[in-house]
Amino acid sequence: MELDDTAVIQMVLQGQQAAYATLVTRYQQYVFTLVMRYVNNREQAEELAQDVFVKAYRYLADFKGNSKFSTWLYTIVNSTCLSHLRKRKDETILLEEEKMVSISDSNQAERPSDKMEQRTQKQMLENALKHLPESEAQALTLFYQGEQSVEEIGVIMGMTTSNVKVKLFRARQKMKDILQSRFSRELNL
Amino acid sequence: MEQNLQTNEEIEMQLWEYIDGSCPINDMQRISILIERNTLWKQKYDELSALHTSFSTNVELEQPSMRFTANVMDAVAATHVAPATKKYINKSIIRGIAAVFFVMLTAIFGYALFSVHPTTGTTSMLPKLDTSKFNLSHVINSETIMIIVAINIVIGLVFLDSILRRKKEQQAVKP
């Protein structure tokens, strides 16, 4: 029988360090995906994701159980990624506006009939997601893949519920626009 | 044209809330009737539902390297779980520091107040101030005071709103 998060946490807090591997295995894909929304580089993402799990382990005693463990863990993901981006702001961060401009440029440049026919729906969605500003891609991922409610996303991203709703709405609208303008034929939208 | 765009956006916003199930029951019923009877609503609903399903099923999670868990466990082996913050931040110490400051300020204020001469209003402790040099009556009048009070009320309401909002969100997050 699979132990729930709270039981595993109790085991770790009682000194069974090896039990922590259960939590890492359970959440590694979610954490890694969320980190990838911020840094589009697998090596860096892996380092950051590892950092997240080490921080979570160190402060595990601070998890009060008021929320789901995943919500608490994703809060660490968010703060770790933001501080990482802040550190290397000058080097790599694209301004969100610039990103959107590049989308509209690429929209005009690429035609649905090009290579897109060979791509699967999954690849198309992944591709479209990469064109969203980090925070919007993060909100969408938390909502659909992370199974977090609007309220929980608010806690993770430090926003009010209504701001999260607006962010999700904008993200979906942008995704719809990107998909319709670039992949409408493949997706039958 | 602009009004049309706005209406489309409003419809889509309502439809997303309907699809997410985050709108009130009354709105759910109203929107489901609109989807049944209105072609535009039906068309938009189908479009957004397809997108919603696509987001839920077609976006795959990224897979880290095979050694990821082992790497984390290696890193974790060198660290210890820190004691809970509430254990080492003793509230009584914080309260004690606050009490010391409060007592000090009260003592200074009390001493200054009691050392004022009852008839002349002068004190040996407080610096003497020639109030005739400062005529602030043209700056501080009833209008300015009303403005300051109004600003304070607005700030107070914003603060109260943020507290209530936070409480509501915390209650919603609790499993």
Image (cartoon, rainbow, N blue to C red):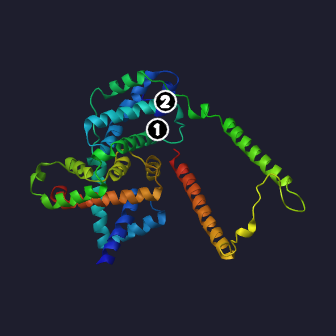
Residue B58 visible in the current orientation: yes
* Quadrant occupied by the N terminus of chain B: bottom left
Q: Could one spot residue B50 in this view of the protein? A: no
What residue appears at the point 33 percent right and 50 percent down from the top-left corner?
A134
Which one is nearer the viewer's eye here, A35 or B8? Answer: A35
Q: Which of the 4 image quadrants contains residue B4?
A: bottom left
Identify the residue at the far left of this view. Answer: A114
Image mark 2: chain? A
Q: Is residue A55 left or right of residue B38?
A: right
Q: Earlier in the sequence, mark 2 or mark 1?
A: 2
Q: Is mark 1 on a helix, strand or loop?
A: helix
Residue at mark 2:
A9
Residue at image position (69%, 75%) is B142
Report the chain holding disc 1. A
Same chain check for tags 2 and 1: yes
Q: Could you tell me how far apart the alpha carbons at marks 2 and 1 are, in whole angstroms?
A: 9 Å
Residue shown at the point (25%, 53%) measured from the top left: A131
Q: Do the residues labelled 2 and 1 touch (CB within 8 Å)?
A: yes
Q: Is residue A136 left or right of residue B161?
A: left
Point 31% across, 49% down: residue: B56
Q: From the viewer's perspective, is B115 left or right of A70?
A: right
